[in-house]
Image (cartoon, helix red, strand yellow):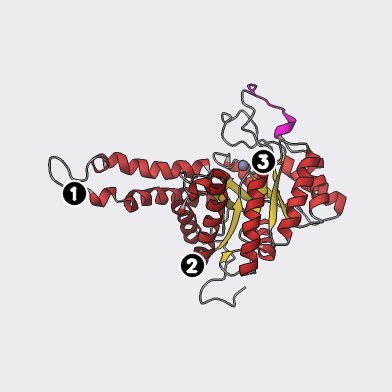
Amino acid sequence: MSLKPGVVSGKDYLELIKACKEGGYALPAVNVVGTDSVNAVLEAAAKNNADVIIQLSNGGAEFYAGKGMPDSFQAKVLGAVAAAKHVHLLAEHYGVCVVLHTDHANKKLIPWVEAMLDHGEAFYKETGKPLFTSHMVDLSEEEIDFNLSECARLLERMVKLDMSIEIELGVTGGEEDGVGSDEIDNDKLYTQPEDCLQAFELLSKIGHFSLAASFGNVHGVYKPGNVKLRPEILKNAQALVQEKHGTDHNPLDLVFHGGSGSEKAKIDESLGYGVFKMNIDTDTQFAFAEGVGKFVLENEKAFKYQIDPETGEPYKKSYDPRKWLRKGEENMIARLDEAFADLKSAGKSIATKKGNAIAA
Ligand SMILES: [Zn+2]
């Protein structure tokens, strides 16, 4: 199985997910905020011969359009559209498959998703392809019936554009702080298998969905060790759906949120339970900052003076943004090398290689 390099969607996306699950690996879904981070992800994927997921949060999309844009809602929409078009244009030239995704949209952000779909419909008319492979709609804070019926409504619209939806069940840690005890047994942090079954029964009739299930994962608020990752939750959800509907092994396409800083052994275990996507943001943000920061500290004067006041040395070669932004990109790429290795996706790109177009 191989796919044309570039943005994948529809049936091709399902092929890619299948390749991940059958191959026991997952793709990093990396949050980006501008062309520097987008290009770093593309470069890292090409370097690792791995397929990848490029993702924007509503804030990332807003930043992409420009923090100074007067209408911030418009910026969230147009920034996402601009980023997607950037990736559509460039991805194939990196020779790998790229999934375009958006991140958490809660109830207040449903209009954001709908506005992106308006643009998606226009793009589809023009090109026959969806603008985004998939949008996430995260109504995990709402009652499950509302969560699922709203996701169903949006999926019906997305299906017409060959799109998928990502939903969330159970609360990814990070909003209720001060859960002070060592052993937390908070049901909400752990998705119930029955809820996954309910989602499967409603949504799989409509189209394709992926599922962010909580198994103790956090977005980085809890101290390490405060919440236990329990990947067996994922295993139980898969087993329940398989048993009730006589499906193949691991019928659910699962997403691991809060991947930054997770124990490697738990990541490894989750791969066996149908996780094909792991979100990473905090660690790649830090990597970018660390790369820039190191350069700035080593070249302090170049960030104060155009010409050295004592020696007369010109610093243009150091303060040129291409110099220090590149340091951020390079360090982000190094962190992504690690992610591709952890997720076992390095070397597994299913994109057709140049000069090898017929090979399967
Ligand atoms: Zn998340």
Instruction: Evaluate if marks 1 and 3 touch, with contact meaning CB atoms under 8 Å apart.
Output: no
| Label 3 sits on residue | 106
Residue 218 % position (x, y): 61, 36
Q: Report ligand 1 position as a quadrant.
A: top right
- Name the secondary structure under disc 3: loop
Badge 2 amino acid: His
| Spatial CA span between label 3 and label 2 | 34 Å
Residue 93 — which label? 2
Q: Do the residues labelled 1 and 2 touch (CB within 8 Å)?
A: no
Amino acid found under the numbered disc labelled 1? Pro
Q: Mark 1 points at which residue?
A: 314
Circle nearer the N terminus (1, 3): 3
Please count the marks in the image. Answer: 3
* Magenta highlight on residue 180: yes
Magenta stretch? Answer: 179-189
Please tell me which residue is depicted at 64% across the width and 52% down the height of the picture: 115
Numbered label attached to residue 209: none
- Residue 296 in picture, x, y percent from top left: 31, 41
Query: Marks 1 and 2: which is nearer the front?
Result: 1
> Considering only order in the chain, which callout, 2 or 1, is on the residue closer to the N terminus?
2
Q: In this view, does 318 lie to the left or right of 184?
A: left
User: Taking 20 as reference, is 339 above or below it?
Assistant: above
**Residue 203, image x, y percentages:** 79, 52
Task: Please tell me which residue is depicted at 54% across the width and 39% down the height of the picture.
Answer: 261
Residue 329's spot in the image, x, y percent? 41, 51
- Residue 322 in magenta stretch: no
Q: Label 2, secondary structure: give it.
A: helix
